[in-house]
Amino acid sequence: MSTSPGASLAERMGRIKPSATLAATARAARLKAQGRDILSLTAGEPDFDTPAHVAAAGIEAIRQGRTRYTPVEGVPALRDAIVAKFARDNGLAYSREQVLVSNGAKQVLFNLCMALLGPGDEAVIPAPYWVSYPDMTLLAGATPVILATTAAAGFKITPAELEAALTTRTRLLFLNSPCNPSGAGYTRAELAALGDVLLRHPQVTIATDDIYEHIWWGPEPFCSLAAACPALYDRTVTINGLSKSHAMTGWRMGYCGGPAALITAMATIQGQSTGNASSISQYAAIAALEGPQDCVAEMNREYRRRHDLVVAGLREIPGIDCLPGWGTFYAFADVTIAMSAVGCADDLAFTDHLLESVGVAVVPGAGFGCPGHVRVSFAAAEPTLVDALARIRKAVGFS
């Protein structure tokens, strides 16, 4: 791959692309900085402040001089707090040596791909998917195998579909519940049924991305895969973080629990890339995990209220349909009819149309492996959401 004279990029750069969500967010920010009236519903970022007791713990860490390198895996007190969290919330027993603290759940996932995958390997990724799963797989030299789902199936994979996608080359399965972007979640019974399939394929490791665990209103309590299928405990990496649940995106706090040998390998990857996560953030994370959780429940109630508002509002717009989710702060809307009505060839053109005609920024579904859809973040105040819905209605020809 060649660029300008004197700059020759690695071949791998030709296999990956920038994050669709970050690109959409950046474009909306540029237009807003130019003075345009833009409502950005792109970012996967809570609009709440970090809880006061968590922020105070970070400030106190600075005052106490806790601003130096820590062990790559994380400070012992935080890893112990994570062990306690997994036991309390998920019924999963991990030791300190089975826990890794990283610069966000994104780095956990990247570490996992780099430690586990290589040329000739495959990673199964249900679609719609979080935008970075395929590119992380490609960066590790492996092949993403996209397993499409449909709204009719609730954007969930079935055991039969999973069985058909797995081969002797499959090394990794990504499982995100509730899912970014669809909001779809799995019940304990559904996870157990998928687990029965995975038990027949011992070469497969499962990455369970539980980052939206506490933004959940499904018909039964949230369940993680290793809890639903304990026989897969030794092959599951349970991934979580504090960005979404505690409104700590900028603090960059992700973590995981998993098989000790794999966790050690992931820590080695991290040690040669970034080293430890921010020491200040780690001490704030202890307060987040061990302190009062009322703030988490309060934010979840507000997200649920906004979900109901946005999903109902989208479904009232002719040409748009939207399946209700079980969690996250996204609505994933089918805009295929609306696209056609306004003369847009695809969802990318439709998002451009929304942005240019009415100043509403959303993310095209193609970036999530599901063309014909858009992701609408409702991590925004109600007046913004009401205004955005009215503008979208106008953009598709209904004022």
Image (cartoon, rainbow, N blue to C red):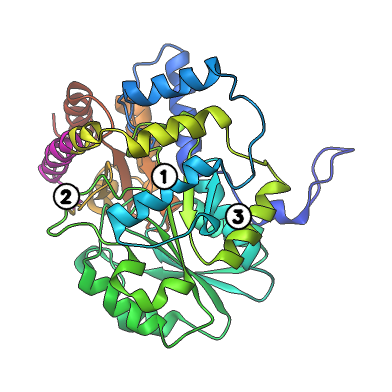
The disc label shown at residue 81, or none: 1
Give whichever of discs 3 and 2 has the lower sequence position.
3
- Residue 346 can be seen in this image: no
Residue 112 in percent (x, y) is at 57, 59
- Is residue 336 placed above or below 279 in the rendered structure? below
Name which residue lies at 37% across and 50% down.
84
Few, some or many residues within 10 Å of mark 3 (<14, 14–19, 20+): many
Give the amino acid at mark 3: Asn
366 lies left or right of 187: right
**First in sequence: mark 2 or mark 1?**
1
Is disc 1 surrounded by few (<14), some (14 to 19) or many (20+) residues within 10 Å? some
Residue 287 place in picture, x, y as percent:
38, 32
Q: Can I make out residue 148 in this image?
A: yes
Separation (CA) of disc 2 from disc 1: 25 Å
Query: Looking at this view, is 383 or 257 the one in front?
Result: 257
Q: Is residue 142 left or right of residue 44?
A: right
Marks 2, 1: nearer the viewer: 1
Q: Is residue 318 magenta?
A: yes
Task: Name the one closer to the observer, 255 or 312.
Answer: 255
Which residue is at 25% across, 59% downward? 185
**Residue marked by disc 3:** 111
Q: What element carries label 3?
A: helix
State how far apart marks 3 and 1 are (Cα).
21 Å
Residue extent of the magenta highlight: 301-322
Q: What element carries label 1?
A: helix
Taking the image as shown, residue 12 lies to the left or right of residue 17, namely right
